[in-house]
Structure formats: structure tokens, C-alpha cells
Amino acid sequence: MEIFDGQMCVFGGKSVSTSVNIDDFLLDYRCVDVTKTVEQAQPKWKLQNSASQFAMPPLAQHTTVYDRVNHVIVPFGGQSPNGFSKAINLAVYCSMFQAWGASNVLDRDIRRYVHTSVLQDKTGDMIIFGGASDPTTADGQDLNAGNGERWFDVNRLVLDDARHNAYNTSSNATLGSILKDDGQGTPDVIRGVIHHSSVLLNDTLMVVLGGDVYVNESAVMQPFDLLHIYNVDTMKWHTQECTGDIPPLRCAFSASQHERHIYMFGGVNVNDWSTFFNDLYELDTLTWTWRKMPTPNAPSPRYAHQMKTLGKYLIVTHGFIYYEDGTNGGDEDIYFYDLQKETFVTRYSPSGISKRELDTEWRVQRTGATDAVSAVCLLLVVLVALIAVYYMLSMLFTRSRPRPRRQSRGEGILSFVESYTETF
């Protein structure tokens, strides 16, 4: 899920099925206009025709980043339908032209899913961490994918070589380069982590939350009282102890940042896959203190959903949902948590949300000067139109008026004699 050009958009995904047949994939891209009021129930999702199944890659459990500088959304990894092979170039979505297309970035990194990726704005690099590969990732064509390989190290994908090389003056990376960080290795306890979340603080510190690693043929979930943080610039890891209302162990939750706080919602216990969550936790990154938030009117417990911050709202959509009657499924409602009122609300309002947050600041803005120029141009167009209409009407009137009969030579002489006679 990304927010751009005043829209909140969801790309691809799957139905509640765990298989990878083509019919299980949702080959669409739909948006909601967040420059207007949005209702929680039955929101007005708009299917974008430019991102039909003929243009958008069929993916699920992938990640996306949005590069505001170049106005492109870049999906990475994910499961693919049976029979699909790995693409040569990454498909990207251009928000200015509202169209999908193949980029100049080669899809060279190992395809994976249940990983994380974040964008470092100052370098234009996509930072990729964790995840797993198996036969569902591009038909099992990746290295060791058939063995269910998990990935340990941090990789960075160069999406903008000019920004990358300007910040890293000793670098001469090219567009699409895969750079393996050669700093301190990933701590053993989170090597091969999946189902986690990552948040980039201050464009430098990647905070890794939750997830599970595979130890002795069982999933070991990561605690929330000791977090692992990766410095993207120095390529070094460190740990951070946390206090307060420590969240229970979970995976496949969603996390999002608002100012100095990180918020975490939902998730599932992967040791039984039947314990779902719909609670919300706040982590203060100054004091590293967890707080369990009040959640009146909370949506049903879920995992593998998505959450974004927009203004004072946390926005939660989709996911694999556990209902009170014991059934599982999904819904298309959108849930808005008001951080000021600390409750889920039934209606979202864009009031007070900046153009930068809505990603509409790049549009041409109307001012008094532009309005004056527009008025002058409109006046000139009207004036030209009136002149054209007058000319056409005058021509029609001239053609419709009867012309006087031309006198013969004899009649002219007779008329002259009569006028001469009257004079005398």
C-alpha cells in the first residue's frame, strides 16, 4: 500500500487461498481518493484501468517503496503464479503518467517473499532484509530456492544512481546495482528472519520488529523487549532494550511511523496460526518505551494486512481475518485510527493533512497570478469567438439581402433625360 498523488492505493495480493494458482492472485490495482472524506464501511475503491492484468505483475507477499523524487513505485520480490518465470527487468509504476512499465533496473537480486524493504530518501536506495525463497518465488528459478532458502544479509538496490553516488562520493554504482553491505554481519539471532517489519528512522536507522527464525525445525518468534537496529550508513548493527507494555510474541503484523513513534497493529502466532491479534502498540523511540493503546471499535483480528500513517490517522486495510463466528476471510473496509482521539473512527477527513503527506505538492498550484493569467486567456478566447460569430452572421446577412437589378444602357439614358428635364 502506498499513498501518492492524493490517493491511497493497494497493489496485487492474493485471496485467502494459500496456493499459487493464477486464479488465486488479485490482478488489479485499486485506489481511494484521500483528498476527500472516506467512510470506513464500503469505501469507494476505484479500479485503475491502467494497471490491468496486462500491465501489472502478478505478485503476493511482496514489498513496495515509493520514490517521491522520481514519482515511481517499485515492487520487489513476492510470490508468483505457477508457471511464471522471473522477469528480466523490475516493473515499476509511474505516478505522474499513471501507468506500469518495465524499468531500466535489472531484477538481479534473489527473489524472496515475507521480507521487508525500506527506501532511504537521500540515496534513493531500496534496503532489503530477510525473507525466504522457495518454488513459489518465480517458479523456483532462484539460487537454492527449491530448498526453501532464507536470506541473512542486508542488500541495497540502487534505484537512483545520481543520488546514490552524490551521497556516497567514493561510489560509482550504476542503476540497478545490488550492493551487499560489507559492514558488520547480521546478528545470529535474526539471521534468516521472516514475517517481520522494518521501519527507517531519520533516514538512517532501520528498526527490525518481531518476525521468526527457523531453529531446529521450528519457528522461534523474536521478542519486543530487545530490538535489533541497523545503521544504513555505517552498516553496523546494535541492540536496543525496551520497557513498558511489552507486546506478546507475534508475526505478520504491520508497523508504521508517526513522528518519533512506531505503531504496531495485529499479527498472528506462527506456532499455531490460530492466535490472531487486533491490538495496537506504540513505541516511543526517544525513551524506547512500549505503550498499549486503547482500541475502541477495533476491526477484527488479522494478519498479513497493511498499515500506513497519514496525518493524524493510522490506516489499516485488508489482511487475513479471523471473525467472531470462527470463520476466516477478508474485507474491503478501511479502518482509521485517530491518534489524537485514540480510537478507531468511522470516517476519515483530510482536514489538516499537508500536501506533502498527500503527495500533491508537485501539482501546479493555483495562485492570484495564475488566476489572473487564466482570466485574461479566457477573455481573449471569448473575444475571438465573438468576432468569429459576428463575421459569420454578417456574411449570412449580406448573402440573404436581395441585390438591386442592374439597369440596361437604354434605361440609364432615359433616367438621365428625365432627371435633366425635371431640373428645368
Image (tube, grey):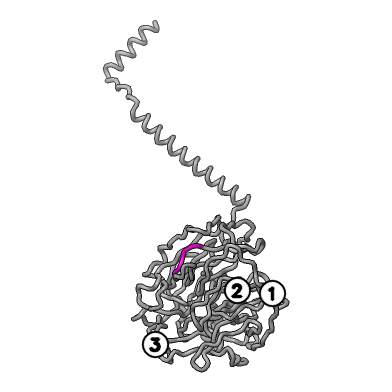
Residue 279 screen position, x and y as percent: 59, 71
**Which mark, residue 284?**
1
Residue type for callout 2: Met
Q: In percent of the image, x 43 and y 63: which residue is there? A: 48
Residue type for callout 3: Gln
- From the image, state whether disc 1 or disc 3 is nearer to you: 1
Upstream in the sequence, badge 1 or badge 2? 2
Badge 3 crowding class, 10 Å Cα cut-off, few under 14, some 14 to 19, many 20 or more, is some
**Which mark, residue 264?**
2
Outermost residue on the right side: it is: 287
Answer left or right for 172 relative to 420: right
Outermost residue on the front side: it is: 325
- Residue stretch rendered in magenta on the structure: 328-333
Q: Find the distance from the CA under tag 1 to the CA under tag 2.
A: 12 Å
Q: In percent of the image, x 38 and y 78: which residue is there? A: 19
Badge 2 crowding class, 10 Å Cα cut-off, few under 14, some 14 to 19, many 20 or more, is many
Cβ atoms at labels 1 and 3 below 8 Å apart: no
Q: Secondary structure at mark 1?
A: strand
**Taking the image as drawn, is residue 169 in sight?**
yes
**Which mark, residue 141?**
3
Outermost residue on the top side: it is: 424
Task: Choose between 141 and 272: the one closer to the eye.
Answer: 272
Q: Secondary structure at mark 2?
A: strand
Q: In percent of the image, x 39 and y 5: which residue is there? A: 424
Where is 107 relative to 40, above or below? below
